[in-house]
Amino acid sequence: MNRRGEEQTRALKAHGCLAGLALGDALGMPTEFMTPEQIAAEYGRVEGLVASPTWHPHTALPAGSITDDTGQALALVQVYLRDGRMTAAAAGQALLEWADATREHLDLILGPSTRQALDELRSGADPRHSGRAGKTNGGAMRVAPVGVVRAGDLDAAVADTVEACLPTHGTTLAISGAAAVAGAVAEAMRETSSLDDVLDAGMEGAVRGREHGAWVWTPPLEMRIRLAMQQVRAAENEAQALRALYDVVGVDMLVTETIPTSFGLIVLAEGDPMLAACYAANLGGDTDTIGAIAAAVCGAWQGVGAIDQTMLGEIERVNGLDLETLARDLAAVGEGLR
């Protein structure tokens, strides 16, 4: 393939990554915090863009709305587009700008670690230290654009991940989880990658990411990812696999649950972003973040052609997005850094 063809392929993969992230986020938005039993009672099965129940915290958000997962990821996109590189200072400023622009619904979607860190940043804290208490999945949920820019380069993906995490999620655990996602996306962006290559890169990213940040107790995340994949592969059917992820691995906002379960869904979906997002939306727990991560990795691997274009168009309409342009520009930044 000539250089022009390679650039086009990367642009399609970048678009698939951002589209998958937004899809998983929007599909999972209405069912976040719910159990599988509650989801089944309310919807039967979520397979499209639906609104939250009237009693749900997200009931003020229209069907198809994205949450902080996509919003913060697009904030990191803007860092690359403005500066051409990722730094903790720029990431912290971009997240503050995103929060200010999202003020109307911010209380509905903002996670605890990010909320605390943004308050510290507003008070003048150093963005390289403001996230030293962040142990949840907020760093991982937004980091997919790092993998797009650092396509095929795990070392660079981990380095940029550290910078992107420090302002709000600067712990060994949070950075390990984020590096797993960025590493998987970076590998998925390669034209010749297999799904096993993508999964292996994610586990290696988890290992390398754990070398950075403020130390906290954590089981090695790569072992938790391996456990999730084993649960899926040992299951006799889809329902059993999903139940095993819910019961054995977990679906909370904890990094040791969200990230392994996301990788388990990638395996169960065999790299299909639509399936991964749908599985997450019906799984229960932190459905939007699990869906955003799993579908972003799958979207990067398969490209935007694997995404339902009608559904994607509705998400873009509801949220005022132009993901194709953002993805093309983001991929171009990556080309310039090679």
Image (cartoon, rainbow, N blue to C red):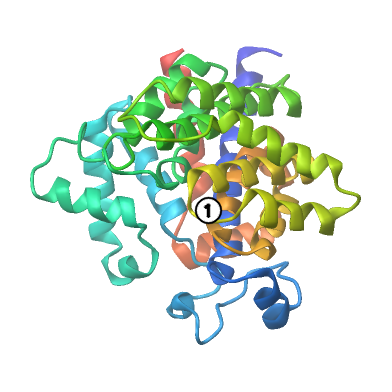
The residue identified by callout 1 is 289
Q: Does residue 74 lie above or below 85 as drawn?
A: below
Q: Is residue 300 visible?
A: no
Q: Which residue appears at 59% of the width and 29% of the height?
A: 222
Q: Is residue 6 left or right of residue 103?
A: right
> What residue sits 44% from the left and 43% below the top?
142
Residue 262 located left or right of residue 56: right
Where disc 1 sits, the SS reads helix
Crowd rating for badge 1 (residues with CA inside 10 Å; few <14, some 14–19, many 20+): many
- Name the kind of residue labelled 1 in the image: Thr
272 lies above or below 309 = above
Is residue 71 something one can see in this rendering? yes
Which quadrant of the figure has residue 210?
A: top left
Name the outermost residue toward the bottom.
54
Above or below, 187 relative to 43: above
Q: In terms of depth relative to the viewer, which is nearer, 260 or 310?
A: 260
Q: Nearer the viewer, residue 26 or 135?
A: 135
The residue furthest left is 124
- Compared with 67, 256 (above or below) is above
Where is residue 246? Give x, y as percent: 67, 57
How many numbered markers are drawn? 1
Q: Which residue of the protein is positioned furthest toward the right in this rendering?
A: 236
Residue 223: give x, y in percent of width and height.
62, 30
Instruction: Give whichever of 50, 200 is nearer the camera.
Output: 200
Judge by depth and name the residue closer to the eye, 146 or 210: 210
Q: Position of residue 158 (x, y in %)?
A: 44, 22
Q: Quadrant of the N terminus?
A: top right
Say left or right for 12 vs 85. right
Q: Quadrant of residue 204?
A: top right
Rendered image quadrant of residue 162: top left
Q: Residue drawn at (40%, 53%), measured in percent from left and top?
A: 71
